[in-house]
Each structure stands twice: as C-alpha cells, then as structure tokens.
Image: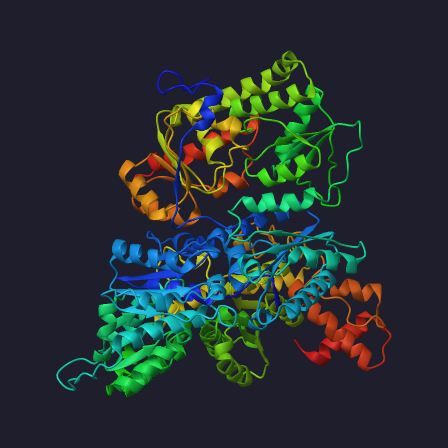
Amino acid sequence: MQLTVWTYEGPPHIGAMRIAASMRGVHCVLHAPQGDTYADLLFTMIARNGKRPPVTYTSFQARDLGGDTAGLVQKTLAETVERFRPQALLVGEACTAELIQDQPGALAEGMGFDIPVIALELPAYTRKENWGAAETFYTMVRALLRGRQAPQRQTSGRRPSANLLGPTSLGFRCRDDIVEVTKLLDSAGIDVNVVAPAGASPEDLLRLPEADFNVCLYPEIAHGACAWLERMFKQPTVKTVPIGVGATRDFLIEVGEVAGIDTGPAIAAAQTRLPWYSRSVDSTYLTAKRVFIFGDATHAVAAARIATEELGFDVVGIGTYSREFAREVRDAAARYGVDALITDDYLEVEAKVLELAPELVLGTQMERHIAKRVGIPCAVISAPIHVQDFPARYAPQMGFEGANVIFDTWVHPLMMGLEEHLVTMFREDIEFHDEAAPSHLGPAAKRQGGEQASTTTVAGAEGASANDAVVWDPEAEKELRKIPFFVRGKARRNTERFAQDRGVATITVETLYDAKAYFGR
Amino acid sequence: MSGDGVFPEAPGAAGCNELPVQRERGQRHVFCGLAGIVWLHRKIQDAFFLVIGSRTCAHLLQSAAGVMIFAEPRFATAVLQDRDLAGMADCNEELDRVVAELLARRPDIGTLFLVGSCPSEVIKLDLETAAERLSEAQQGRVRILAYTGSGIETTFTQGEDTCLTALAEQMPDLPAGERSLLVVGSLADIVEDQFNRLFEELGIGPVHYLPPRSAAELPPVGSGTLLLAAQPFVGETAAALIKRGATLIKAPYPFGIEGTRAWLGAAADAWGIDPARVDAVTAAPIARAERGLARYREQLEGKRIAFLPDSQLEIPLGRFLHRECGMQLVEIGVPYLDRRMMASELGLLPRDARLTEGQDLERQLDRIREERPDLTVCGLGLANPLEAEDLTTKWSIELIFTPVHGFDQAADLAELFARPLNRRRRLAI
C-alpha cells in the first residue's frame, strides 16, 4: 500500500478514456463499478467538452457479483455497439473489474461484431494514466495496421508529409500545439498527413503509413506507437519536442534532415519575440533566478532548457512523476548539476520545494498549490490539468508562438525588476511586508492566498532551525527578517551551517553577513 | 400551499405512499459513497478519512469536487499495489504500517475512519476487524472506525449514511429518564445555528447533531432520543439509532417553507409542544421566507424540471419546487427509493409524478431529449453535454454543498434553480 494525498496521474483506464475521447468514431466499453463514471467530468467540466466521452460503463454493483457479471458485460457491449455504431470498439476494465476477471476483451472478441474490437490490458495496480494512454494508442495503431504493406511513397514532385502523434484530450495545451506545429511544418514546406489520436478516426489511422515520417510530439503518449511505425513502415521519428525557441529551431533542423529538405529559410524567417524580450535590459532582474521544475518528463526537460538558455535562470531542482521517462530527466538533471527527483509522491515534492526555497516554481497544479501556500511565484507547465489549463485564448506551448506564451506565463508571477529592489531596500515599509504580493497582482492579493495551511506537515518555507545547538542573537534574528521571505529559509540554514562549521555558538549580525559573503547570493 | 389550480393537488392521504415507481437497470451515472468524504472531512473537524482503495479512488477524491484547495487535506488513500493483492496477511500488515505512518505525520487526528472501497470489498479486506485491532494498538489515543464508501455498495450520499452508522455504534448512552432531540444528516454550520435558535424558542432541548462538528464529542443516544432526519439519505443510520432505543419522528425534510414548518412541527409534536407555540415561533421566519421566495416563484412557475438520479434529495426538492414554486415535474429519478425515509414526502408529490429508481443512462437521456424540460438537474459529468444540446441544467452537487435547509434558505434554494434559467435569458450570444 502506498499512502497518497494527491495523485499526479489517474489509473490506466483513464488513459484509455483519453484516447477514446480524443478520437472520432471510437467507443470504449469499460467494465467498471458504479461510481467510476466520475471520470466523465474531467472531460466535460475541466476540458469543457460539449460531448460526453465516448465511454460506456457496465456499472456493476455488489448484488451483481454473485451473479452473471460476464453477462452484464455482454449486454453492455451489444447495446453500446447497437446505439453508437462505432468504427472501432475499445474494451477494457477498471481496477475493481480486474479483480473479478471477467475478461471483457475476450468476451467482446467472441461476440462477432463486424468492427475491429481492440481488447486492452490495463493493469490498474502497477500502471498509471499516461502508460494507459500510450498502451491504448499503441494497441489500436497496431491492431488496425498489422499485416499491412508499407505504401510506395513518391519521392519527388510533392511536399513531404508528417504525422503528428501524441496529442490527446486532457493533454497540456495540445489543442493549440497542434495548430502551432502544423503552421511550423507548413512554413518549412511540409504537410501534415494525420494528427492522432486527437481528432483522428480509425480510418485516419489506416492512412498513417502514407506519411514520410512521424513527429513524436508527446513521447509519454506516442513513443510506443512511433517506434512500432518506424519498425513496420520504415517511417523515421522526429524526436525533438519543439518547446522553446532553441528546441523549435532544433526541431526544424531535425525535420529537415529526416525529410531531406532545407529548413534553413524557415528558421531564418521565424518570428519570435522571446529572444529580444529576454535580452532587453528590463529582463536583467531575471538573471540567475533560482527555479525548481516538476512535471511530466517532456515538459520538465523542455522547461529546464528554456529556463537556463532562454531566460538566464538557475535550475536548482528538476523532477518528474513520469517514471517511464526517468532516464531523460536524470540526463537533464546531470546537465544542470542537480539531482533528479523521480517521484509521484506530492509530499516529497513539497519537501523538496521547501528545502530548496526557489524563487520560481515551474510545475503542475500541485506545485502551484505548494508554491501558493509558501508564497513562491509559480507557473504551470504540465498536466495534470486544471480548468485554467484550457484558456479561451490561443495559448500553445510549442513552436515560436509557444515560446512567446511561455515568456509571459513565467515572468508574470515574478516581481518586476525595480519593485523587487524597492522591496529589498525598504523591508519595513507597511506595504512591502512578507504577505504582500507583487503590486501588479492587485492590492487584495496576498502571498498566502486564502488557503488553509496545514500546521503539522512542515514548519513553513522559512524552515525551522536545523540545529538546536546554534542560537540566534535577537538582533541577528531581526536582521534575518529583512531578507525576502522566499530566500529567508535558505539564508537561515546557510548561516547556521556556516556557524556550526566554525564552532560559532551564537549567530550575530556579523555572522549573518560573514555567511552571506561566504555563500554569495 | 401554492400550486393549486394549475396542477393536481396532492392529497395528504396515506394511500399516496403507493406512488408507482419505475425501476431501471443499466449504466448508472452517479458518484460512489467515497464522494461523501468531500464534505464530511470539513464537517467533522477532528476526523481523518483514509480510503483503502486503488488509484481510481484517490483520483475520484481529487477530481470530484475540485477540493484541491487544501495543502494537506484530512483525507488520503492507501493505494493497493499488486503485491497487496497476493495475500491477506500481507495486506493487514501493510495497513498497520500505513496507519502508523499517517498517525505519525498527523498527531492531531482524533478519529480515523478506514473507508472501504470497491477493490477492498472485492478482496474481502475486513476493515472492521482491522479498525478494532488498530484501535487497541492505539490504546485510546485515536479512535479508529471503519465504514464502506464503495461504489458496489453505496451511491454518493449513502457514503454519509455508512459513516454515520459507524459513529452511531460509538455514541454514549443517554441516561435513562433523560430525553433529547437528535438531528441526523450533515447540515451547514449556519443552518444548525438557525435551527438551534428555533428549537430553543420552541422549548425543545437538549438538541444534538449527527455528524457532530467534533468526533470527540459524540452525542448520546437512548430510549429518550427523538430522531429527526435532516437529510433523506440517513436510513441505515436511523435504523442503527432505533436499535439503540431512539424513536424516529416521521416528517418531510426541511426544504422550503412547507417542509421546514412540517419538520419543526413534527419535532414539536413529538416533544409535546402546543401547536399554537409552533405557529407563534415560526410565523415571523415564514413571513420573511415567503417574501424572499416570491420573486423566484415568479421565475420558476410553470417551468418543467427533470431530476436525474444523484443525491437522494430529488424527491424532497421536487416536492418543494412543485408545491412552493409551481414547477411541473417531468421526471424524478432517484438512485434508490427508501420508502421508510420518504414516507412523509411521497404523499406530497403529485399523483402523476413519474418516479424512477435506479438508472439506465442512455434511455433516460433519450427521454430528456424528447421531453425537453426547461431545467434538468444532473451530475457534473452530464451538465455541459446537455447544455451543448441546448438543455438548461443545474449541477446537483451544489445542492449538497450549499446551505439550503430551513426557512432562511428557502429563497436561496429556489434561486439555485432560477439562476441557470436567468443566465440563459441574459446571454445574447
């Protein structure tokens, strides 16, 4: 058993639902008890879909368990196919059904439907949502395309074409990324053959082999399918994920190599504001801001590159809940000289944030809560998604426009340059106290938000004394209060460590400044 | 009351209890009982809820009501792993370890509920025995209780019923010869305070509430206890309290003016209070509530409403909207029909009301599409898709999370139904 407060990912059948809800002409039957229908609201409330996800649940109850639950599965399957007439049927089971072993996939395969029936294996007690989505997409692609011949692709007299693979319902900003990447490829003279799973029908999946190459936009979802297509149909995979200016340029270079065309002109013609905004002098205050990054692997790794190369931040910590992609995040962490935090335990992430006391957190909605509670600015970079991650406006993360969006999104929560200096200079100003939020967020905004902070979890961002043997002189304690809230914990710990190493029993104002000189900013 | 002339008036005769009900079986679009934790953990402030379940349970809890506003909430899930499913002895040891870990983290926990789920039920993990074992190990420091919120056993608000049933067994005895009124079912704190003032003016007391605001202060129960249900979904709890000697007061539920008046009247009658006193005490709040309600009655009168099965409040709310707001009832769907708990309500529904029990979702939606009610009350998963079909909806979960009981909330309750219609009228896009 694993004690869980919040969870970054749902169970794997939610991943299967995401694939079904992304596509057209697909229906999913889930063997699941009453109550599991809660998942519909992720699609209809959070993503504001106007349609229910194409999912039918068997809704078994305790009284069914002694009887014929397999019969209930068959009845549900028959009624679902009759009512919805899908082009392909996905059949899976949620956690409880896995325990009663009715084998709904095998039952469906035996019912003689005249449509492809795709039986899903979704081990609920070992795997999670993104794995379930990747597995479902891969299983469907394989089921529909197995045994087909690779088409003869014309090599001359036409624009190369690509499939965009991985965008799904409930994915982070997928809706707008598809538009942006399509534009980006078009600017380089490349057509999009099929986008999948988002918006695709089973018939569209049959056209996948016609493309010259695949773009693995969201590896968490599409890596398995891309690898299989590469093996079966000799379609190379473009692996660079175009998030950030540098990555978008690299993406176009890789696309050029794979498609055998020159993408140099497209790169040269690209319109992007991020580089100049970042070089302009009012961005100086961003220099070496200490940033902590946590999210799915793809967005976390991309964020780290943008943070360091494009905004001039220092990455003080990076982590992911995507265990399947731990290696990629560990590699990135090594590049920035930090240890990767690979965990799906929200409390562990919280402890890390408190320990590092970063000046900016780039995370998921979970980290937004951690950051809000302890008064650290935060921007959201990754799923799990929230209703705020479906903005009404066009707000991609990918491509050159995505980089512009990211610049605004990450910089907005921070104090503006001069304001930060004023706050530091006039600590005792009545409006510049610890609780005050950046002035552009409005006079009513409070750092602590309106939330109830737990009293027992942690001693707060400031951190308790690491060592009871070291005593703070009241004057030094008072001086410490003048250091901005979000770095005060670190200053306290550094000073205590400095004192301890030197055998200083009482920390005075002098010790505080000696430590400051020793550690630097 | 209102509603006469336009609609067949419901006679109060006992025969109406036999209102026919249509039973449906098929896909059910309701929360499981775990959803009750979302409000119970706020109501009972010294309790912690530990679900023994799967990742699905944890995901439901954080998705169900957007409750991620708490840094560390007073609930968590012990997520079963593959190796837990191998052998039972192992599972109990794991549970002991997780509980120890939790109690070390949260020394403030006074009462810990082990909440059963679908997987824990299916693998027959005996949480009651585990709770006894763990309680003993705690030597009175923490009270550990078990109840089920599983979807195979419970529907949405039934999770409160199973929770309160577990508490009922722990309640101290009411000394012989003493009497008290016990109000059962979660109420908003502000509503409790309003009712307390009314009970005091009526001369009824002491009055206790289940759930209490603190699990450490469980109310007593005994043969002198008069039981007044504030929510229609506390049938098992009522049965457990009756077993301990309590007497159930038959009354409709305190929604709207009529319901609240009858509810207080029934309590006063059982306590032996002169009906004239009830009239005197309730006259002013009733007059105020009537003034508040009038404007919403204007907006709701003649409008057609359908309830999809959800919280068990469908029957009393349908009664209120029909009799006090003049709405027409297209269909009242309930997850299950507890005739004892609904005895005083069913007689107040119009004789031609279409009452359905259980659910066959697609067929029910077909009926809604065909009949096109002006307002459909449904769960969160269905609301936007129905709106996209140009059907106005009211999310039912708001009816659980908003103070809606009593005289002073009668207008607020009506407003919850008037608001979607009002919004629909305003928007010109």
Q: How is the image coloured?
A: rainbow
Depth check: A119 or A457 in front?
Answer: A119
Q: Is residue A478 visible?
A: yes
Farthest front residue in view: A67
Taking A425 as reference, is B212 above or below it? above
| Numbered disc total | 0
| Image location (x, y in percent) of residue B223 | 73, 30
- Residue A107, image quadrant: bottom left
- The image quarter in which residue B53 lies: bottom right
Q: Nearer the viewer, residue A498 or A103?
A: A103
The quarter of the picture where the N terminus of chain A appears is bottom right
Identify whether B78 is placed above or below A147: above
Left or right position of B186 against A248: right
Which percent across, then down, holds residue A96? 49, 62
**The C terminus of chain A, quarter of image:** bottom right
Left or right of B20 in this view: B117: right
Q: Quadrant of residue A136?
A: bottom left
Q: Residue at x 55, y 52 (%)?
A: B34
Between A458 and B405, the one lying in front of the other is B405
Q: Residue furthest left?
A: A157
Residue drawn at (27%, 87%) of the image: A234
B272 with respect to B352 (left or right)? right
Along the line of sight, the residue nearer the viewer: B175 or A13: B175
Q: What residue is drawn where x is 50% and y is 20%?
A: B291
Q: Position of residue A485 (x, y in %)?
A: 67, 63
Report whether residue A54 is seen. Answer: no
